Image (spheres, grey):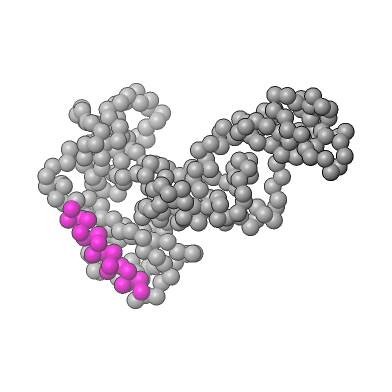
Amino acid sequence: MAEVIGVRFKEVGKVYYFDPDNKKLHIGDTVIVETARGIECGVIAMENKEVSDDDIVHPLKKLIRKATKEDFKKLEDNRRKEKDALKICEKKIADHGLEMKLVDVEYTFDNSKILFYFTADGRVDFRALVKDLASVFRTRIELRQIGVRDESKMLGGLGVCGRPFCCSSFLGEFHPVSIKMAKEQGLSLSPTKISGTCGRLMCCLKYEQDAYTDLLKRTPKVGAIVKTPLGRGLVVENNLLSQTLKVKMDNTPDDAAPQTFKVKQVRLVKDGYIKLNKKEMDELKGLE
């Protein structure tokens, strides 16, 4: 076991472990630590805690100090520099005629490196741009291509639900979401219904997936053959949340309306399966 603190470098970002160096820290404290990128300023997201050695990437970097007034002033200076660097880089991108969209600029705390985050449809040869920027800023330059989800996380905004983006308000990391999840949850597979502002599948599809997976295990699927109090029939519709089924009875005319039963009222004879139309899946693959 080892005592660690958890530090977050972005408002909603991943938490990294550091050695507290025998100091007691509290959530919200601003601290200076050494990272793989250099000296950085972060905020305590997890107070001193004992964790297993298996959960730690060794060697564990030590806390340098709690932030001072001078450190906060340097942070303000860096924010001003980032705004200027953004304008300069956008002009350089236009001068080089590169098809890329600059999203954000970040100075490391010690100014040893400037990171430029951008999006692009494909690979971009930005070697000449890096040399140009290095001659202007006289420090190490890193251009990092990010995805549209990362762009939304950085810029923020309102989702289709009317609330701030999950990714920019509380999601530390992105979780895998798939078309299969939308299908299993009985959602419309229209791109406008299941995609977020970023143009990818909504992250919230993941939130209730475990509950739907559990319900699917004990709910006959569409196409299942079941035995009901009124006889045998075919499930033509199911509602996982209300645990009800609509069953087309074998002993009724073809044009007769299906009967509704609670799941606990029927006995499964042969289960159906969720059909994933290949053409439909291929068309929606770009949303994942």
Q: Can residue 272 be found in the magenta stretch?
A: no
Closest to the observer: 48 or 126? 48
Spot occupied by residue 20 in the image (x, y as percentages of width and height): 24, 31
Spot occupied by residue 173 in the image (x, y as percentages of width and height): 42, 43
The boundaries of the magenta stretch are: 76-94
Asked if 265 appears above or below 224 in the picture, the reply is above
Closest to the observer: 167 or 143? 167
Q: Residue at x 67, y 28 (%)?
A: 218
Q: Residue at x 13, y 42 (%)?
A: 68
Apparent side of residue 14 relative to residue 259 in the rendered image (left or right): left
Give the position of the N terminus as an image quadrant.
top left
Spot occupied by residue 89 in the image (x, y as percentages of width and height): 30, 67
Location of residue 211 by image quarter:
top right
Q: Residue at x 57, y 55 (%)?
A: 191
Location of residue 63 by image quarter:
top left
Spot occupied by residue 141 in the image (x, y as percentages of width and height): 30, 61
Apparent side of residue 90 relative to residue 228 in the rendered image (left or right): left
Asked if 263 appears above or below 120 in the picture, the reply is above
Q: Residue at x 41, y 72 (%)?
A: 98
Extreme residue in the front direction: 256
Magenta stretch, main secondary structure class? helix
Closest to the observer: 25 or 59? 25
Q: Can residue 81 be found in the magenta stretch?
A: yes
Q: Is residue 29 visible?
A: yes
Count of marks placed on residues: 0
Q: Is residue 142 visible?
A: no
Apparent side of residue 108 relative to residue 226 in the rendered image (left or right): left
